[in-house]
Image (spheres, rainbow, N blue to C red):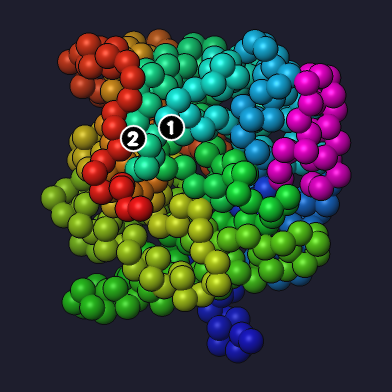
Amino acid sequence: MLNILEVSETNKMIEEENLDVRTITLGISLLDCIDSDLDKVNKNIYEKIKRLAKDLVPTGQEIEKEFGIPIVNKRISVTPIALVGASACKKPEDFVTIAKTLDKVAKEVGVNFIGGYSALVSKGMTKAEENLIRSIPEALASTERVCSSINVGSTKTGLNMDAVKLMGEIVLETANATKEDDGLGCAKLVVFCNAPDDNPFMAGAFHGVTEADAIINVGVSGPGVVRTALTKVRDADFEVLCETIKKTAFKVTRVGQLVAKEASKRLGIPFGIIDLSLAPTPAIGDSVADILQEIGLERVGAPGTTAALALLNDQVKKGGVMASSYVGGLSGAFIPVSEDQGMIDSVTAGALTIEKLEAMTCVCSVGLDMIAIPGDTSAATISGIIADESAIGMINQKTTAVRVIPVIGKGVGETVEFGGLLGYAPIMPVNTFSCEAFVNRGGRIPAPIHSFKN
């Protein structure tokens, strides 16, 4: 039970420090929607999602009102559509019909995003998986709420370099297909290594095949709360600093646990996991970069940045796992550029480069996230960025991802506005030396030796 002091403390976190539950995500298995008839597949998908998700948004709003806890997003994740549509979809255009069905039902039940327009191709691609991947530009250009993710590698399987090469081309095609919106489609497309089955955050969420028929996963967020706590220990040593982050992460995760259990009970759907990631927003004071600067950096990107981020990530996890029985998803600290005002400021000041961000991804939750790059960046260069980031995940047995946005017709020094939680971003320079011969070799990069543990 919460005592009155903790209630007061939580209220202050919500009112003054940007504490919120970032998302309640309802995971839905679509494996029982599979059919060889495409019209029937679309009908089955629509009816199952509508039936299970019809009360998701109203229930979230009720919990917000009763507990006074902001729940920013209500979302849905589904079984990777490459699996669901494999029997019925014979060409990329067939998969696009499923994307439109997902978009339609997402709008009708009121969620802001639906994830799972996905394929898991870490070792190889079926024809259906290749067709889904090739359909992504049209699918994301013709829908509003559909999110796509492709897993191109893992520690156990190595990297599928054919898929890496193809995804560089697809990212660029998606940018061109949505160029009137400054490449917004790419903000809904993530390329993973070691993608988790239970991630509630977009754009990378999908409902893994190891999951139950339906599940409630919750993502919490409180960068502002952590930063405020650290302002009180500015002169303290690392032991005190770490204890402060752990205690704060515990409190933040407790709020998420409360919301998750309540949503599970009211919807009659089992509780899955809490993802305790620190997910920033463009709002002032809600920044992971600000936390790192409170730890002692003049700007994110300065020497010591990777060490500070490693410390933060580890202490958040240590505090969070004590507050919930089931912690999963990504869980740690996100470092998106466009969604974090402190990151934007550091890029603008010249303190932060893509190369430094890549180093930081060795110790953070995800990877190169929401980075705007010049529209004339080649597909091979994008594939090289994906390969580098995937290699970090593969070797370090962690999740890494790439969400870069080539902005067609714009270059370094210009700014692109995405709006809402997606924020805005300065276009960052990319190394222009070619990696085309490397990317074009084809085949797989083998799994690392430490993956063999049987």
Q: Is residue 246 above or below residue 347?
A: below
- Say which label, 1 or 2, has the lower sequence index: 1
Q: Residue at x 38, y 26 (%)?
A: 160
- In the rendered structure, are the residues bearing label 1 and label 2 in contact, judged by CB atoms less than 8 Å apart? yes
| Image quarter of the N terminus | bottom right
Q: Is residue 439 visible?
A: yes
Label count reads 2
**416, 266: nearer the viewer:** 266
**195, 293: nearer the viewer:** 195
The image position of residue 158, as x and y in percent, is 34, 35
Magenta stretch? 28-53
Q: Residue at x 54, y 21 (%)?
A: 126
The image position of residue 136, as x and y in percent, is 57, 19
Q: Is residue 292 above or below residue 318?
A: above
Disc 2, SS = strand
Mark 2 is on which residue type? Gly
Q: Is residue 305 magenta?
A: no
Q: Is residue 180 visible?
A: no
Mark 1 is on which residue type? Ser
Residue occupied by mark 2: 158
Q: Is residue 204 above or below residue 70?
A: above
Residue occupied by mark 1: 122
